[in-house]
Image (cartoon, rainbow, N blue to C red):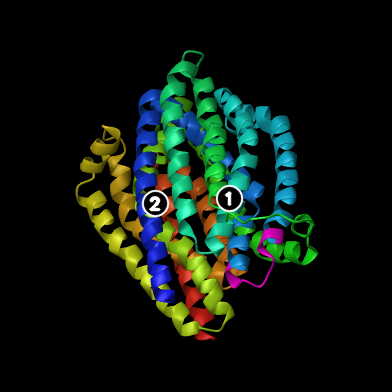
């Protein structure tokens, strides 16, 4: 029954992931065609900040709730409602800080004044993302994947329609307003997702005063899992946040123009990286299904089951990853033309494709460590990879090798983190 549950979860999440990836592909096409390389460059400049703030706003709550609900040792309703007020308070603090610092980030750090409105918009999106993520964590812990799948599909579809209608309107006011609108659309899409998730709550679902009263033990348990998980995401997000700043500084020192840097960074971050990560919908599905399965089995000392699930997860990841890598390496023009109707950045794609094969197995390995309660070990891998990526990006970018410094830094990060997580997973199961 456990095996069937895991396979069914992976299958459902894969189908859902495939559908959302298809919709996301259309979203990227809409963005690329309407915003152009310059608009995509601005959007990708603020994306690291967006990612960092999302990590801070969520504070690892979704993973923690998923793990604790799966272990089935607590009042799950109280678990969720103990976390939501903390999450909202944290989001309010982030919004205030962002309103104060957005002008400095756009003008001084990113050196792109047109990113200001998009940065301000991020703050108002975060509370909606946080709430929907917490609800998803609950359903994941219950191993009910259908609510997550349908909410994701609905969310992306609504976002696509809103972008098609809204971007041309806001472009008339200016490119910076159009980019800000792309960020703000997340409010509508996340609200849609929340409504869908609420629809799947049991019909007899009732909230009592006991459920609403914050439980110190629940909060402590959530933080014990959430903080290391968040630290891992924040470390990665800080590296991602610093990436365009370091890249812009170093390449400007080498004589490259800001326009060239924005355009090339937009091509790599807006076209090449999303294309390479396209197969990750499958590895993400595996990782999401793995956490509640491994959490429950590991808490009950069923180590052989855990080992089998890890092997199965890695096998499935490579089953998708290897063919994708071959296509990107041998026939790179085909996916580029189909998705973007252009071939900018093929030289970058052919170099990153083989390295990305390691990235496809990284997510299941990290999810395993989190499910085993070893989020600190996962965090150490992310920390090491981020340090390597940040320093190598700065050094390589000063060598006058164009954007290849960025490609090299990305590759070194993927290789180190994947090998680190693999060693930690192997060690954790060897000791049991």
Residue 255 in percent (x, y) is at 46, 30
Q: Compute the Cα span from label 1 to label 2.
A: 16 Å
Of pointers 1 and 2, the one earlier in the residue sequence:
2
235 lies above or below 256: below
User: Is the residue 360 above or below the residue 173 in the image?
Assistant: below
Instruction: Say which of 120 and 67 sits in front.
Output: 67
Instruction: Measuring from the top left, give residue 262's x and y in whole percent.
Output: 45, 30
Query: Which circle marks residue 327 in the picture?
Result: none
Q: Is residue 73 magenta?
A: yes
* Residue 17 marker: 2
Q: Residues within 10 Å of mark 2 (few under 14, many from 20)?
A: many
Q: Is residue 57 left or right of residue 354?
A: right
Label 1: few (<14), some (14–19) or many (≥20) C-alpha neighbours in 10 Å: many
In-front residue for pair 80/269: 80
Circle on res. 133: 1
Q: Residue at x 38, y 75 (%)?
A: 311
Relative image position of residue 204 (x, y in whole percent): 62, 56
Camera sees residue 14: yes
In the image, residue 38 above or below residue 293:
above
For the record, the magenta segment spans 70-78
């Amino acid at each position: 029954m456990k095996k069937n549950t895991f396979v069914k979860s992976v299958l459902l999440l894969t189908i859902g992931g495939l559908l959302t990836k298809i919709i996301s592909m259309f979203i990227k096409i809409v963005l690329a065609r309407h915003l152009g390389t310059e608009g995509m460059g601005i959007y990708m400049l603020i994306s690291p900040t967006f990612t960092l703030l999302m990590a801070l706003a969520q504070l690892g709550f979704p993973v923690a709730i998923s793990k604790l609900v799966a272990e089935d040792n607590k009042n799950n309703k109280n678990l969720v409602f103990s976390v939501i007020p903390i999450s909202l308070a944290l989001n309010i603090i982030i919004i205030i800080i962002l309103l104060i610092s957005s002008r400095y980030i756009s003008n001084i750090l990113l050196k792109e004044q047109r990113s200001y409105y998009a940065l301000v918009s991020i703050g108002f999106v975060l509370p909606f993302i946080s709430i929907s993520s917490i609800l998803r964590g609950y359903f994941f812990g219950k191993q009910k994947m259908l609510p997550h799948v349908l909410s994701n599909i609905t969310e992306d579809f609504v976002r696509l329609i809103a972008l098609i209608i809204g971007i041309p309107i806001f472009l008339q006011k200016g490119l910076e307003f159009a980019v800000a609108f792309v960020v703000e659309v997340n409010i509508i899409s996340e609200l849609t997702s929340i409504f869908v998730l609420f629809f799947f709550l049991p019909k007899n679902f009732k909230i009592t005063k006991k459920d609403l009263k914050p439980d110190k033990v629940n909060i402590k348990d959530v933080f014990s899992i959430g903080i290391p998980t968040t630290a891992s995401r924040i470390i990665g997000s800080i590296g991602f946040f610093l990436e365009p700043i370091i890249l812009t500084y170093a390449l400007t020192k080498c004589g490259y123009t800001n326009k060239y840097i924005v355009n090339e960074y937009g091509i790599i971050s807006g076209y090449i990286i999303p294309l390479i990560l396209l197969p990750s919908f499958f590895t993400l599905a595996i990782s999401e299904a793995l956490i509640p399965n491994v959490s429950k089995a590991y808490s009950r000392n069923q180590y052989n089951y855990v080992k089998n699930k890890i092997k199965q997860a890695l096998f499935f990841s490579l089953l998708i990853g290897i063919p994708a890598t071959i296509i990107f390496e041998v026939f790179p023009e085909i996916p580029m033309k189909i998705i973007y109707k252009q071939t900018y950045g093929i030289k970058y794609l052919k170099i990153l494709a083989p390295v990305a094969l390691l990235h496809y197995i990284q997510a299941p390995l990290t999810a395993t460590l989190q499910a085993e309660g070893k989020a600190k070990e996962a965090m150490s891998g992310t920390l090491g990879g981020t340090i390597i990526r940040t320093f190598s990006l700065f050094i390589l970018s000063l060598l006058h090798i164009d954007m290849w410094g960025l490609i090299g830094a990305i590759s070194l990060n993927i290789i180190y983190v994947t090998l680190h997580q693999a060693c930690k997973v192997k060690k954790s199961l060897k000791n049991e």
